[in-house]
Amino acid sequence: MKRARVIGAIVFVGGLLFGAFGGEYGTFDWFTLRRQVKEEERGLSELREELDTLARAAKAIEQDPATQERVAREAFGMHRKGERLYKIERSKQ
């Protein structure tokens, strides 16, 4: 009877150890994978926010005349008739 309990305890402890460390994916591997999934979900959320921001900016550039004028002035140095364009260049030292 005592021998059966010892063997049963060894099998039980062995099963616990195998569950924690053994197999292709042990319990600790599972915890690591869960943490990685959460990190990837956070990254995906940030990318979705950036995509929404860029979509709003693209829509404004396509449809809003004030935004179109601002972009044309900033990106291409355009100006209206009667305005003077001053360009400040830095020295190459």
Image (cartoon, helix red, strand yellow):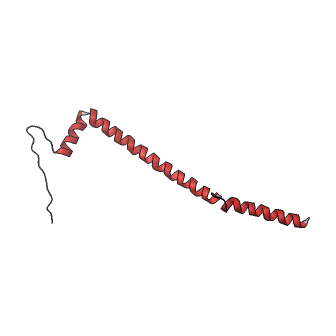
In the image, residue 16 sits, relative to residue 82, either above or below, namely below
In the image, residue 3 sits, relative to residue 48, either above or below, namely below
Q: In which quarter of the image is the N terminus?
A: bottom right
At x 11%, y 46%, the residue is 85
Q: Looking at this rendering, what residue extends furthest in the left direction?
A: 82
Q: Looking at this rendering, what residue extends furthest in the front direction?
A: 24
Query: Which of the two residues, 23 or 68, is positioned nearer the viewer here?
Result: 23
Instruction: Using residue 87 as the reference point, say whether residue 15 is left or right of it.
Output: right
At x 20%, y 45%, the residue is 75
Residue 11 image offset from top left, x and y in percent = 79, 62
Residue 42 image offset from top left, x and y in percent = 48, 49
Q: Quadrant of the C terminus?
A: bottom left
Residue 58 image offset from top left, x and y in percent = 31, 38
At x 70%, y 61%, the residue is 18
Query: Which of the two residues, 73 or 83, is positioned nearer the viewer here?
Result: 73
Q: Looking at this rendering, what residue extends furthest in the right direction?
A: 1
Residue 90 image offset from top left, x and y in percent = 15, 59
Q: Give the image quarter of residue 79.
A: top left
Numbered marks: total: 0
Query: Which of the two residues, 33 or 92, is positioned nearer the viewer here?
Result: 33
At x 31%, y 40%, the residue is 57
Instruction: Using residue 84 as the reference point, say whether residue 54 is left or right of it.
Output: right
